[in-house]
Image (cartoon, rainbow, N blue to C red):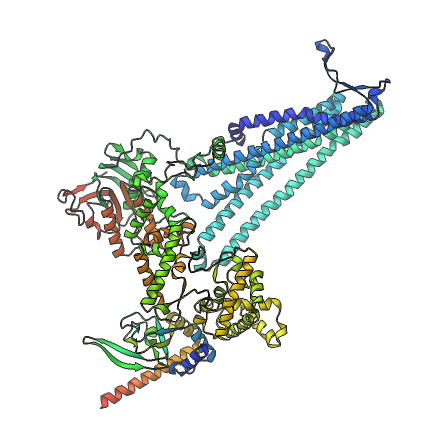
Amino acid sequence: MEKSLFRYIWTHSRRDQLIVCAVVLASLPFYFMSLDLPRQIVNQAIQGEAFRDGNATAPFLHLSYQWPKWLGGGTLEIFEGFQVGRLGLLFGLSTLFLFFVVVNGAFKYWINVAKGILGERMLRRMRFDLFSMVLRFTPDALRTVKSSETATIIKDEVEPIGGFIGDAFITPIFLGMQAITALVFIMIQNVWLGLIALAVIAVQFTIIPRLRRELLRLGKQRQLESRQLAGRIAEVQDGIEVVHVHNAYNWERAEIGHRLFNLFSVRLKIYNRKFFVKSLNNFLAQLTPFFFYAIGGYFALRGTLDIGQLVAVIGAYRELPPPLKELIDWDQQRLDVQVKYDQVTQHFAEERLAPLHEPREAAEEDVPLTGPLMAEDIRVAGIHGDMIIEGGAFTVDLPASIALISNGGAAAGMLARIIARRTSEFSGRIRIGERDLMQLPVSVVGRRIAYAGVDPILFPGSIRDNLIYGLRSKPLGRIEEEKREMDRRIAEAIRTGNPIESIADQWVDYERIGARDENDLDRILLDLLDRIGMGDTIYLFGLAGRIDPERHMALAERVVEARHRLRETFQSNGMADLVEPFDPERYNSQATIAENLLFGVPISDEFKGRNLAENGQFRSAIDRAGLTDDLVRMGLQIAETMTEIFEGLPPGHSLFEQFSFIGAEELSEFAAILRRHARGEGNLKREDRTRLLALPLAYIEARHRLGLLDDRLMARIVEARGRVREVLAKSASEGVEFYDPEHFCAAAPLRDNLLFGRVSYQVANARVRVTEAVATVVRELDLLEDIERIGLDYQVGTAGRLLSPQERASVNLVRCLVKRPDILVIDGAFAPFDEARSQQMLELLLELLDQQSLFMVLPNDRQAGTFDVQLRFRDGQIITEKTAAPALRSARPEPDAAQRVAGEVA
Amino acid sequence: MTLETEVQSLRQVPMFRDVDPARLKLLAFTSERVQFSGGQRFFSQGDPSDAAYVILDGRANVLLNTPGGDIQVAELGSNALVGEMGILSDTPRSATIMAAEPTTALRIDKRVFLELLAQFPQMSLAIMRELAKRLERTNAQLVAQSSS
């Protein structure tokens, strides 16, 4: 990026700046006219100066131009004007005034909008430029740069710069011209007074910036400190586990407190200084009139200065301070923003960035990376200057499977990273066939080489999104979008140096992986996940997933069909008591009272959990059904039991969370409610009743067994369902989706839609047997793939935290496999798996990568026998050893008998 | 059958006889009441010990797996506690328990049970007392056997 902010602004917004500037200039005559008109209205129309000579009419809109004397003088008549009477002139001039007001307003509006848009465009460009630089950070820089700091820079720190850009050139020109006009006017009236004004301005313009220099230093400090604060907060949150483990709350609290104090101190200094400078500035501005009054008055008394002139000068001076003050403010803002810009550019300093990759992909031939791989004279230095690999060399024929057997040091991992093109910090040459590995364009590397390291990096989104991340190198087809909107989007992108591709386009390269369409791709993904051992997990994710029945109409219908089949299976196999189905006419004793009352799934939060007790519609429905008192009574009984049996457990005990209706912190509050109730029914407050009412809503008779429900009450609750439905329907509330045995319930997960009931709490082992039965029906009705496909929609969460480490590693591997790389490099990606599982995975990889190459770092040679070639690292050298008969790849042409090829010794 | 009746059953179990009623209620509340059909197993010999059971209603057989097939060594009736040794000693099941008829039992989860013991020393003491008595009985039986 340019070193100077102004150069950056000028380079990228010259045209717009000039246009706005021109419009500002064009608006000035109108502005002055509107200033002059009131005088004309008063003097000419009202006081009648235009009719002084006894004229009955006066010209209106008379336009003429007085040639200057040095051009010979004389008057050029442009328009003689209309001859109008006094009233006509008054209304004419007034209308003209209104016209100018409108025109000025229009100008002002346009200029503000144009300046705003200009600023926003530049802000977009700047943010995008900065983000592009984030992608270019060198590994070295990444060791020191904190991501959260970069985020605050791109989000917050450039914001004021964007706001300033619209004013960068226009404001000084505009205000400067105003100030100069006023100054020239004063000069013309009286040179000495003019010089005094000039002298004071000169003082203002020298002293104030000097005083502000300190302010800038402080501003810089403030910016750095707040950036570090953001970084530190993110660090603490990312490392929160360590804080918990080592009980470092106090330390972290003190640390942040200290930072906030420093920040406060800096801001306090800025505050003091800023207002000191401001008052000094005001004082200097007021000093000039003092001189005018004192010295001008003195001249006037002496008779050397006309009093009219003095009044005119003072009048003109009144016009001078506002633009001057604004100009000084602008200057302050300029310096401020320049400092911010400098700080930003320092963060993205050139030495932290990798060189820009030229987009010359089209010319590159994209042929498989096979043939002899020759590495010569590889040297890698460690962080401390020691040599990890010193003159290593080896040759292998690709495709092949190569084990990089670690000697406990960093050599194997380094070589893996070099082959995967993850690092360029080595010397030596690696060629594949005729091509230099290091010279391959990034597009080819991205397509033909995959690397799976220890840390599987996942982005928030669905499992599918993560799996196909490697297939999105460029958009291959356009999704139809509205033409006008698209043109606008593209035009803006071009104007601001942003990419014109839309993320709505079709980015996924189906052809490359041999898929016909989306469904085919899903099938490939599911097959890989299944083989890698994640099939069951995906199935479970699918069962827990929800679908939109509008979009997946066929599936929704089949799920309802499966629901019926499942019921039949239960009936015929004597498993009827395992699941209690949702029946509109019967109470479901395995479900909560809330669920029995709603007979549906809450969609909006106000119908979920305890909120239901506060929901007006729900309350009025159960009021009408006459259930409120019963529920409150049940609430009392629950509260009594809970306070009795959970008393004495320390707050925060896991049993509370797992079993109690009442949180530990609420126990005493409910005890107080119970005491109030004991003094008499009437003592219960309205809020007390609401809180009590909330308790039985979560009550499940079969599970909690407090004996609160009898048949009569159950019947009344079933009856009340109709009321609830009625009330909700009347208010057109979208808060609950009701159960219907014949229809899919979009708000409930697939599992609940299949079961359409609750698994019994009372029958031993019910859950396991139901799960098996569901799986059988799913298989029979051929629903497995559809459900697994829903499982691909499972959200992995921030950094994949909603997945287990094994699942993360599996997703990472499948992401590598699905793009069918010519070379797959694996370094520690099996770490979360035990030995048996990782052996299975290895066999799977060797099978899948039959025609491709696999480089894998191994901690020891226990698994090395299955690889074609084994590379060992000893004293900085690489020793190649061909496996006589690889355990699995017997179909391959027999490699030469085991022979040792020592690397060239440096 | 409600929580109260379960608490009554628990009170009949020697190991819980001295435990505070409120604690027994907590134990009952945190347990699950499950039904086994006749012939269904509570657990099988060699399974990991994850819960203890109190039979509330019905009968269950204790079976030992021998090379000659399963042999029945005892029958358990109402208010019998079974499986508690496994969860205390953290060893696999030493026998198979099979319901002899439709049987209702209270399933006390191992984790919850241990947590209650850790929380309420009075409960632990009651358990220890019962274990000590059992040991005494076993010793007495041994003495009787060796002298005979």
- Above or below, comparing residue A150 to residue B66 in the picture: above
Hey, which residue is sitting farthest right in the picture?
A54
Locate residue A196, reporting x and y percent. 73, 26
- Relative depth, front residue between A36 and A432: A36
Residue A872 visible to an observer of this rendering = no
Locate residue A394, reporting x and y percent. 21, 39
Locate residue A244, reporting x and y percent. 45, 59
Locate residue A503, reporting x and y percent. 43, 39
Q: How many numbered marks, from 0 up?
A: 0
Q: Which residue is drawn at 34% across and 30% down?
A: A362
Question: Is residue A261 left or right of B63 when viewed as pictured?
Answer: right
- Relative depth, front residue between A186 and A738: A738
Residue A646 visible to an observer of this rendering = yes
- Relative depth, front residue between A58 and A194: A58
- Relative depth, front residue between A226 and B8: B8
Res A776 → quadrant: bottom left
- Above or below, comparing residue A626 to residue A41 in the picture: below
Res A305 → quadrant: top right
- Above or below, comparing residue A192 to residue A216 in the picture: above
Q: Which residue is drawn at 36% across and 54% down?
A: A558
Hey, which residue is sitting farthest bottom in the picture?
B148
Hey, which residue is sitting farthest top in the picture?
A72
Q: Residue at x 36, y 66 (%)?
A: A767
Assign the C terminus of chain A to one quadrant of the image. Answer: top left
Question: Is residue A690 left or right of A446 when viewed as pictured?
Answer: right
